[in-house]
Image (cartoon, rainbow, N blue to C red):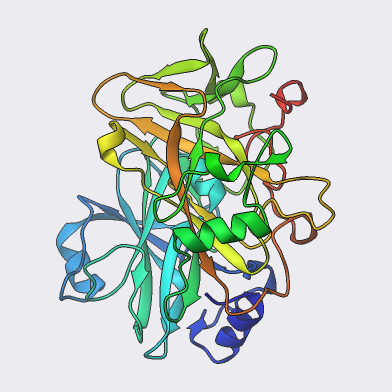
Amino acid sequence: MFPSQLLERAIELEWLHGGDFRIPPANIQPASVDLRLGPVAYRMRCSFLPDSEPVEHKLKQYVIDELDLRDDGAVLETNRPYLIPLIEEVSLPPEVRGRANPKSSTGRLDVFTRVITDRSYRFDEIAPGYRGKLWLEVVPLSFTVRVRERLALNQLRLAIGNAALDDADLRATHADTPLLYRDGAAVPAEEVATANGLFLGLDLHGGADRHVGWCARKYAPLVDLHEVGRYEPDRYWERVTGEEGDRIILSPERFYLLLSDEAVVVPPHLAAEMTAYDPTSGELRTHYAGFFDPGFGYDPTGEQPGSRAALEVRAHDVPFLIGHRQPVCKLTFERLIQAPAKLYGAGIGSNYQGQGETLGKHFQRQRAHESD
């Protein structure tokens, strides 16, 4: 996987470019590049994959309306798919591929996004050697949102070869540089569960008031995605408290924000991605935004051992019981070509280092609950 300095070089070579819009240095993260919305959004009848056609050809069959994202932007309604051409385009060499994922703040608002490309059979995968436009499908699920041109809802990584760590690699890495912590100490090797990745469990114990997370309210007010720290959480979220026995029951099709029990460390030479959980373990979906840049939870002084992960959870079909430390998601890790020139954290304005709260950056922080 490409680190920040190689992503900068890829932009110089125009493997990734914004046409008349220069890619700002602030959009280059430790192992990813933020992708910006173009000036128009298409309200769609349905989602689709282009298969053997260009996106623009297939788009014409399903578009209902066109929205102008310039100036004040436009409102995207819940449960309606929108397709938005991104400012950035790619011209990748034959050996370089890309992968996209939502930004963390996007997932925490239950805004479902995925990238499509011309003549593609898969979402979020940019084939080696692809040259052309990138399109973003956007589906707000819990909240009506306002978006504008140049807003970044997702990010792109570039990679070459197979850099994934297998379970033996993960265990060896954890023994040398712990990847998971619990209560300030490295998780013992015998308690680390692996299956092509590391499993994470839920914290359903909470603090003194047993507050363990949030559930999205129905019929909440609009959220302008350009506004940071503006919105009062209780207008948009219901507090979730644990029952006796440190468990909760998820209501079907409601969206929850919960915290992992374990704190995660992503060393500078690695990046991580949260992957879909095996559906045979319950009708449960975790995560929409699952990428962890190098440096997430990393503190070379050892004073802050890891950052807990925010888990976006939705149960399907039936009420579903989950308990404290129940595994609900899995982290896969990949090596970087070299350590990045900058790491995730306060030094680059990262929002979620050392987080003790799951709400995204658009909401006001509530001091009384930050230590829950």
Note whether residue 172 is visible. yes
Query: Quadrant where the C terminus lies?
Result: top right
Q: Is residue 204 left or right of residue 51?
A: right
State which quadrant residue 191 falls in: top right
Confirm whether residue 361 shows in the render.
no
Residue at figure coordinates x 66%, y 80% from the top left: 5
Residue at 40% of width from left, 56% of height from top?
A: 196
The image shows residue 38 at horizontal and vertical percentages of 46, 66
Residue found farthest to the top: 244
Q: Is residue 125 shown left or right of residue 63?
A: right
Front residue of this view, candidates 203 and 53: 203
Q: Quadrant of residue 142?
A: top left
In the displayed structure, would residue 36 be above or below residue 339? above
Q: Nearer the viewer, residue 308 or 360?
A: 308
Vertical relation: 305 (above or below) 17: above
Residue 156 on image: x %, y %: 49, 68
Q: Position of residue 212 (x, y in %)?
A: 58, 22
Where 221 sits versus 15, above or below?
A: above
Residue in front for this viewpoint, 4 or 70: 4
> In the picture shown, does residue 20 fall above or below 67?
below
User: Which residue is situated farthest in the front direction here?
Assistant: 190
Q: How many marks?
A: 0
Q: Quadrant of residue 167?
A: bottom left
